[in-house]
Amino acid sequence: MQRPNPGELLRGLRESLTMQVLPALPKGVAHQQMKAALHLIGRLERSWDLVDDHLFADNADISEVLMDFLPTEGPESLEERLAAIAIAAPEGYNDATLREAAQRNLALHELLADQPYSPTIAALHARMIDRDSRLVGDSGEDKRNTRE
Amino acid sequence: MNSLPAPDDAQIQRALALRLGGADGPTAISGWQQAFGGNARRAYSFEATWADGRIAPCILLSQVTGKHVESDTAAEFAVLSALNGSGVRSPEALLLDAEGEITGSPSIVLERMAGQAGAVDFLSADTRIGRAISEDLAQATAELHRFDWHSAGLVSNDINPIDSQIASWQDSFRKHRLEPHPVLEWLFGWLRSHAPEPVRLSLVHGDLRPGNFLFEDDRLTALLDWEMAHLGDPAEDIAWIYRRLWSPEKFLPLDEFLAIHAHHAGFTIPRRSALFYRIFSEAKFAAISIAAAHLFATGKTANLRHVDRAAKVPECLRLALGWIASEDWETRDAAA
């Protein structure tokens, strides 16, 4: 283990910038940009170690549902359909396994978009949105009357 | 629009003086200063003095290149021109520069009206003032929705403006998405198959919310930012006003807003329509957020408010799916 870990580093970065840099900036574009950056750093601090689980859980859930709709073998099977979807691996990943999982996730989402709607798909949609909401730190609490 | 370097302030003022004055000679420009124009436009306030001695406070609004909402300056000018003198609380449209000859980008000059627009100031107002402004917002919205757009010369080229509005946001979403978003894709399909018939086809502001109207003391003085105005269901504006991020619900519950609106508009918006457009608003906000994230990801803006905008999408979808699945929606839908 390497301390400080990424969450601790991000917290230190956020606190230091909040205490020492933000107050020194005049009101205006630079100040607005720093506030937006701090907001993002805070979100990364809360979510940096959730990304892997989110991605693998999403892939497993969607795969399981789609396998119930698709034949187990042949050109219409899940793996054949996924292989036929030409999607480039997204940038931003350092780990090859994670990058591959992200690429599969994009293909699964594309395949899911083509499926006819059903209660099973509706339930999957709800689980996907719950997962995404947790990842971005949207716990569902009332957020009225805060500015965009 | 040309590709020359952006003109400096002095060049802008010279070009503006000539265009505003027209055949009567240049208009005198004074008190020139940059103002806040939102994420999508640059703004400059100034005083114009015409050759005949008329003086007016003005604002010049000029498009920026990297923006997350598609808009048409000429269409906005046409809407504002049609509204001039109608009683709808909107600034007088003074000049259109669709070719970008003044600033390098399409621009309009409007009368600068009294009041402040701060969303935070409005939402943190004391209860009495907040309620009074919200009631006046309901009335001003009704005045807009009863406006006779046809007689004023505005025309609709859409066979079905409601479908077109849903389609335009779906198109924007598809154009800008960085990933497939199957749930949002499904939601647009749901909207198409559940859109209610509008009780009346009205001129809809399209972005009516705190921050886009001026208020002074306890009175609303003007509706601003008409870039997204279109013909559509008046329920769309009301649902957008009551989107929870900026909703005036704490000052004025939606049902009371609807009652005031009905009194001044002369027609009643079905509650089912308001509920439908509440769901539409989440799809629209998700599409805007995805466009904003795309702008940053493709280097078209350096505005850090856009960098993580796609993180807003799950909340939009959670709300929309929750409302669609709720017994509340089913009951009210069936009762409509």
Image (cartoon, coloured by chain):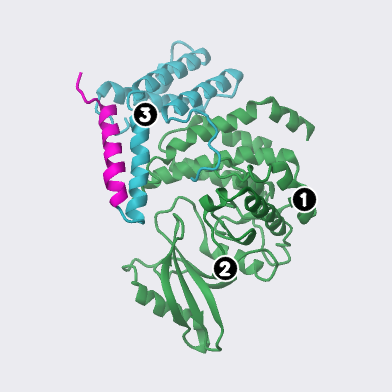
Chain colours: A cyan, B green
Depth-wise, is mark 3 or mark 1 nearer the camera? Answer: 3
Q: Percent position (x, y) of residue B61? A: 47, 65
Q: Say which residue label 3 marks.
A: A46
Q: Percent position (x, y) of residue A145? A: 55, 43
Q: Circle 3: is it few (<14), some (14-19), or many (20+) Cα within 10 Å?
A: some
Q: Percent position (x, y) of residue B83? A: 66, 66
Residue A18 drawn in magenta: yes
Q: Say which residue label 1 marks.
A: B262
Q: Which quadrant of the rendered structure holds the N terminus of chain B?
A: bottom left
Mark 3 and 1 residues: CB-CB less than 8 Å, in contact? no
Q: Say which residue label 2 marks.
A: B113
Cα distance between the residues tagged 3 and 1? 46 Å
Q: Secondary structure at mark 1?
A: helix
Q: Which quadrant of the rendered structure holds the C terminus of chain B?
A: top right
Q: Amino acid at mark 3?
A: Arg
User: Residue at 39% across / 54% down in the picture?
Assistant: B66
Q: Nearer the viewer, residue B320 or A24?
A: A24
* Residue numbers of the magenta segment: A1-24
Q: Chain of mark 2?
A: B
Residue B260 drawn in magenta: no
Q: Circle 1: is it few (<14), some (14-19), or many (20+) Cα within 10 Å?
A: some
Cα distance between the residues tagged 2 and 1? 27 Å
Q: Circle 2: is it few (<14), some (14-19), or many (20+) Cα within 10 Å?
A: some
The answer to whether tags 2 and 3 share a subunit is: no
Total tally of numbered discs in the picture: 3
What numbered label is drawn on residue B285? Answer: none
Q: Chain of mark 3?
A: A
Cα distance between the residues tagged 2 and 3? 44 Å
Q: Amino acid at mark 2?
A: Met
Q: Amino acid at mark 1?
A: Ala
